[in-house]
Image: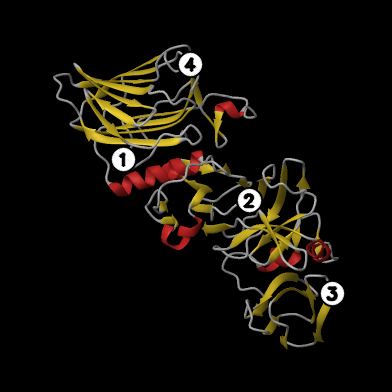
Amino acid sequence: MKSVKRIILTFGILVSCCTVMGQDGSISSPSPTFHWKCNTILNRTNSRDIINHNPVLRLSGRAIVVDSLPYAKDYTMIVVYKADTNEETPLWQMTFGDSATQGVTTERFITDTISTRYVEHTKINPIINTLQQSSPDSISPFIRLVLGDNTFQGRIKLAEAMFFNKRLGNSMLRRIQSALAIRYGITLGPVNYVDGNGNKIWDHADNGRYHHRVTGIGRDSTSGLYQIRSRSEMDGAILTIATDTIEERSFLMIGDDDEPLLFEQDNGGVETLIRQWRVQATGMVANSFSFIFDTRNLLLPTDSLVLLIDRYIILPSSSTSNEVQFDDVWLPSDTCTFTLARGSILWQIAQSDTYDSKGGRFTSNADNSYFGIKPLINIFPNPSAGHYTIEVSKAKWVHAFIYNNHGTLVATHLDSGKEHYTFSGSLPLGNSYYVKVTTESASRTMKLIVK
């Protein structure tokens, strides 16, 4: 594979160009013939020059020009950008001798005099722009590629561009597009997300209801991905997820069900956000996370919000007028759902003496909620038709308390000195309850629904 022979940079733009896999995010198998990714040192608090915590180049009278790309009968061009204009503005141009191909920011690619519609344009969301087609006939052995021109006037954020001198198969395209979607917070169509080896990390068939504003963090050297903080760039997103470090081949993918950002109140005074999020984790053995919610569109005070993961209650570590943050979040399984809620009973339970206020979680989450480890405390069936069973093992003593939504204690179970504990009982139908189970080493509070 030939490398790029000459790069002409105008206006002193800092760019990277590579032909093999490296730290800048090149894709191996196959490597692009040309790959540019913005590595400009930016003030990361300036959101105008960032897409999902990654720097971008705001083009304004600038161009990246690459001569002498090897001519091929077919090619693939992938560009990630965000436009702040509805005008039909050229994003890139390839010259094949006397012929040219252009990609534009609205709805079309232009090949000589023929236009091809490729996507519905939106100013709000960034785009992964993919084109595969045959090259025009040319006697020249080289192609000239220009990214940007003097018509942009700062209205285009250019994040990444790849040129392959061949058509890529669907499997390879999906791998590249998945990595780019995670890196820039872009939701793909109704498809699976895969890692650099083609393994599913977000299953659309299982998560179809939640295939909205899909975002993720992950590490995958094959696709040059190392994303430890992510927020969807799609319209209506309010969630940012983060962690300190991620092992190779580990991913946390999250999507929401596109329900309204409104709260429903039950007869016990608990208000639960209608919108829910679903998690699909891969390779996350012992990671804790931070969940940060932009609360400006929730129309409720943020001083009493809690995080409900399945049926676990987690108090925030910090709260402002614009956001609420939950740190040191441990997930109970690799596929779980969560949402926000508020209500005095939730705070009464969560602020009990078994709650680890410094760590921002219940002690049981640290002890028993790693992926793949069966919890020591279990309540079933849930939802229930009235009867319930609480099982606890490997404990010297057990205290189980059941509260209704008004905070009234309705049932108590106490025992000690056994290998395995089983408590059973019945509750009135049509209500929800909070069951708090405490042992000498762990505590767990879960919501029990009785239909």
**Closer to us: mark 4 or mark 2?**
2
Residue at the disc numbered 4: 153
Separation (CA) of disc 3 from disc 4: 63 Å
Residue 30 circle label: 1
Q: Secondary structure at mark 3?
A: loop
190 or 450: which is nearer to us?
450
Estimate how packed mark 3 is, as few (under 14), some (14 to 19) or many (20 or more) residues with alpha carbons within 10 Å: few
Disc 2 target residue: 261
Numbered disc 4: secondary structure = loop
The amino acid marked with disc number 1 is: Pro
Circle 2: residue type? Leu
Marks 4 and 3: in contact by CB < 8 Å?
Answer: no
| Residue 37 x, y percent position in the rendering | 45, 29
Image: 386 above or below 167: below
State the residue at coordinates (76%, 71%): 442
Residue at 19%, 16% (x, y): give it: 98
Residue 364 image position (x, y, % from top left): 72, 67
